[in-house]
Amino acid sequence: MAVSTLRTLSQAQVDQFLRDGFTVVEDLLDADEIATLAERSDLIASGKAEHIVEGTIQLEQPFREAEDKVDDRVMATRKLAHIVPEDEVLRAHARNPKIVDVIADLMDTDDITLYGDQLFMKPPRHGSAKEWHQDSASFKNIFPMDLISAWTAIDNVTIENGCLWMVPGSHRWAIIPPTSRPTIEGQFGGDYPTVPVPLRPGSVSFHHSLTYHASGPNETDTRRRGYATHYMRSNSINDREVPGSPAVRGYVHIRGKRIPGTVSDEVFDV
């Protein structure tokens, strides 16, 4: 599919994304941008950011279940979620033209809305694995199921400390229902190859919301922080009648037109 107007990617990069369901842009952000993101991530994880609503911070399981004492909340945090509406630093990251231009090239539109965001902290030795999944199985009320996530590496991301793994081409499978998942996932690494996605700090991977992906545990003494911002077209529809739809509090307008009768009607004015 030829993109009408390319902003930053080549047509070959767009074609590779359409084929595989993911792509990587190396060194997209500079050291200052990553340092700002890292500092704000740790502040929010510490629980000392008074502007962040309680409940957006999730600890790793041993700390949630009080098996291990929390001496350092930052190093005990697994995930932070849906922070962009409340934090100007993370909101600036979500609207960073370097990232949004790539999203616009991959979606072939400048009418873009943020569905949500997740900050994965993956602390040393405690960072847990994330099983194989498709994001649209969680974003199940958004149609079309054609969102794209930008996953920014804050630290050096390696196989050993839990980088993402992707299944190329799996974005063309639609949602795999729970009854079929064991059979399909049992073929990963065999009939369906899996690909690791290590990243340098400042590099960003982009994946389709139907692309199967996972991450391993952090078995090292180094941190593995990554920040995912999830984008959708502004003409997407939120069907609240879909059973089990997540209770996302609202969306954030990123670029272009707001379109009446769509997710554009549900954005935060921030």
Image (tube, rainbow, N blue to C red):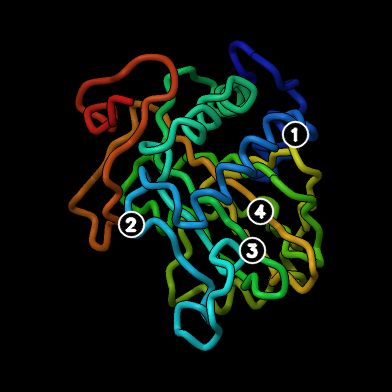
Name the residue beneath numbered marker 1.
25
Please state the horizontal and vertical placement of residue 187, each as a whole percent of the image: 68, 74
Please state the horizontal and vertical placement of residue 182, each as a whole percent of the image: 55, 79
Quarter of image, res 259? top left
Please state the horizontal and vertical placement of residue 57, each as a whole percent of the image: 43, 60
* Residue at the image position 64 percent from the left and 19 percent from the top: 2
In this rendering, the answer to whether 202 lies above or below 239 is above
For the residue marked with disc 3, what is the amino acid? Lys
For the residue marked with disc 2, what is the amino acid? Glu
**Disc with the residue nearer the chain's start (2 vs 3):** 2
* The one of 249 and 208 positioned closer to us in this rendering: 249
**Disc with the residue nearer the chain's start (1 vs 2):** 1
For the residue marked with disc 1, what is the amino acid? Val
Circles 4 and 3, Cβ within 8 Å, touching? The answer is yes
**Disc with the residue nearer the chain's start (3 vs 1):** 1
Name the residue beneath numbered marker 4.
225
Q: Classify 10 Å Cα crowding around label 1: few (below 14), some (14-19), many (20 and above).
A: some
Name the residue beneath numbered marker 3.
122
**Disc with the residue nearer the chain's start (4 vs 3):** 3
* Residue at the image position 56 percent from the left and 42 percent from the top: 40
